[in-house]
Image (spheres, grey):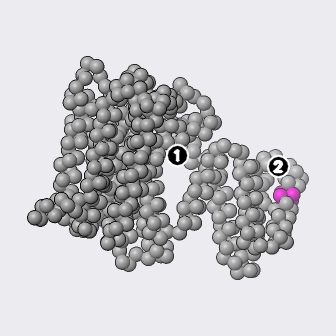
């Protein structure tokens, strides 16, 4: 009876969706890596045969998770997190490099990428900390600790030169937002990202003028007084004129964007002074935002040229249209879009993809597995895969919302956020809407580390839901 009741508590809808996606992924790997001299799908010398071994191991892993007491994951959440941080640190010293990133541990007969499992560990630690009764949504100290939990693995992964895995952790911001983080924080981060993009596309002068204009509009919205707006605008014009005249008299040959810094800096001072005189906290915040925006704007060049690798720089430039190199850095995306577009409505048929068969698309069984789906199954096939992922995400959110314990609910949202981020960024990479950063498509891309990590993420949630019922 106990065994039967346990099976009845399993969310078989989630399990069924998981199996469908894993099987479709396996067939896609077979199509992308098909070798006429090794036609058997069970040939373990080929990637599709090796993936079958990883899939078989995930069934054992999933069963073991369902048999473990759910309290184990709560009790050892911090220990698991600490252990993964130690492994990430260990990778820096004994890890092997692959595609420019030192992020793999080589055990001879197989390799493991710890950064994939670190997402699972971070989700547990985050849920454990934010699920406490003592967690205060309005406490800066608590949010700083949340940022530290997310930031530690990000820092270690960046040291491994694995930008793709590092940016995945930004998806935990969605979890924080669900648990009470102010929406203004997300808007501010989106604003910073917009400044980064605009700084690459436009001259600094236009960025500064845009920031000053935005400040004027916001100032008017806060004050609702046309005279106050005119005073600030006149102050900006006057400060710019003084800076221009002084530069001419002193013989300084400054560029226009340097001259425009004067009204920007003095505007910040003006807002701080007004906030003090009128005791309006909103004006102080506006001045701080303008100052931080200026700092971000002038730090873009350093970040882009000194922190990002050359291949990331060129892929971003190619995406933004700054550079056009379809046979170089843009080759992967260009061939991927050709493959997906050539599939038409119904696709060319299973094992009939020419772009795939003749290896035009690099990494077509890992990061660019979706182009195989597009070429062989067409628009109908790609739409079906996307719909399956959306149903999976919707089901995970339903499961998360019905949990009685905050630890389980927060963990469920972390799972949904990670899968959503991976799916969105991977699909965007293959159709040229996002730079190529090496993010696998869950359950589809070849590789044991990602498949195991996604399986652990999903089935721990299923285990929580079993006990919740």
Residue 214 quadrant: bottom right
> Would residue 7 be seen by someone viewing this image from the given angle?
yes
In magenta segment, residue 371: no
Q: What count of labels does the image hold? A: 2
Q: Residue furthest left?
A: 1
Between 285 and 42, the residue placed more toward the observer is: 42
Find residue 252 and name its label.
Answer: 2
Chain-order first, disc 1 or disc 2: 2
* x and y percentages locating residue 329 in the rendered image: 52, 31
Q: Are marks 1 and 2 in contact (CB under 8 Å)?
A: no
Principal secondary structure, stretch drawn in magenta: helix
How packed is label 2: few (under 14 Cα within 10 Å), some, or many (20 or more)? Answer: few
* x and y percentages locating residue 335 in the rendered image: 49, 28
Q: Secondary structure at mark 1?
A: helix
Residue 147 relative to residue 14: left or right: right
Mark 1 sits on what residue? 307
Instruction: Look at the image and give the residue range highlighted in magenta.
Output: 239-243
């Amino acid at each position: 009876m106990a065994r039967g009741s346990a099976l009845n508590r399993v969310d078989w809808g989630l399990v069924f969706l998981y199996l469908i996606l894993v099987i479709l992924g396996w067939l896609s790997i077979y199509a992308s890596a098909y070798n006429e001299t090794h036609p058997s799908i069970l040939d373990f010398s080929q990637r599709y045969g090796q993936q079958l071994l990883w899939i078989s191991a995930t069934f054992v892993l999933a069963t073991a998770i369902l048999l473990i007491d759910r309290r184990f994951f709560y009790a050892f959440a911090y220990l698991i997190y600490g252990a993964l941080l130690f492994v990430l640190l260990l990778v820096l010293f004994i890890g092997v490099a692959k595609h420019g990133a030192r992020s793999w541990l080589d055990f001879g007969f197989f390799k493991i990428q710890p950064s994939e499992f670190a997402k699972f560990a971070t989700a547990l630690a985050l849920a454990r900390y934010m699920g406490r009764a003592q967690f205060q949504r309005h406490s800066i100290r608590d949010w700083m600790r949340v940022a530290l939990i997310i930031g530690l693995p990000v820092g270690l992964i960046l040291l491994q030169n694995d930008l793709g895995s590092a940016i995945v952790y930004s998806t935990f911001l969605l979890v924080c937002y669900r648990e009470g983080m102010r929406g203004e924080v997300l808007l501010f981060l989106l604003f910073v990202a917009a400044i980064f993009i605009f700084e690459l596309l436009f001259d600094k002068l236009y960025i500064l003028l845009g920031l000053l204009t935005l400040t004027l509009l916001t100032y008017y919205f806060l004050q609702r007084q046309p005279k106050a707006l005119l005073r600030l605008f006149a102050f900006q014009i006057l400060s710019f004129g003084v800076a221009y005249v002084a530069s001419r008299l002193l013989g300084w040959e400054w560029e226009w964007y340097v001259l425009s810094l004067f009204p920007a800096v003095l505007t910040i001072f003006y807002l701080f002074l007004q906030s003090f005189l009128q005791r309006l906290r909103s004006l102080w915040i506006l001045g701080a935002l303008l100052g931080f925006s200026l700092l971000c704007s002038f730090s873009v060049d350093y970040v882009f040229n000194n922190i990002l690798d050359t291949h990331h720089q060129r892929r971003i430039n190619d995406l933004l249209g700054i550079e056009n190199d379809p046979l170089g850095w843009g080759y992967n995306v260009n061939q991927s879009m050709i493959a997906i577009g050539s599939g038409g409505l119904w696709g060319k048929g299973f094992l009939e993809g020419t772009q795939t068969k003749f290896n035009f698309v690099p990494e077509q069984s890992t990061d660019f597995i979706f182009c195989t789906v597009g070429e062989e199954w067409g628009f109908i096939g790609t739409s079906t895969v996307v719909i399956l992922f959306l149903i999976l995400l919707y089901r995970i959110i339903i499961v998360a919302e019905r949990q009685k314990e905050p630890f389980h609910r927060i963990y469920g949202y972390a799972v949904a956020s990670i899968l959503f981020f991976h799916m969105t960024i991977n699909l965007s990479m293959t159709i040229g809407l996002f730079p190529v950063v090496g993010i696998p498509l869950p359950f589809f891309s070849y590789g044991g580390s990602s498949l195991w990590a996604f399986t652990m993420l999903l089935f721990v949630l299923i285990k929580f839901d079993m006990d919740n019922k």
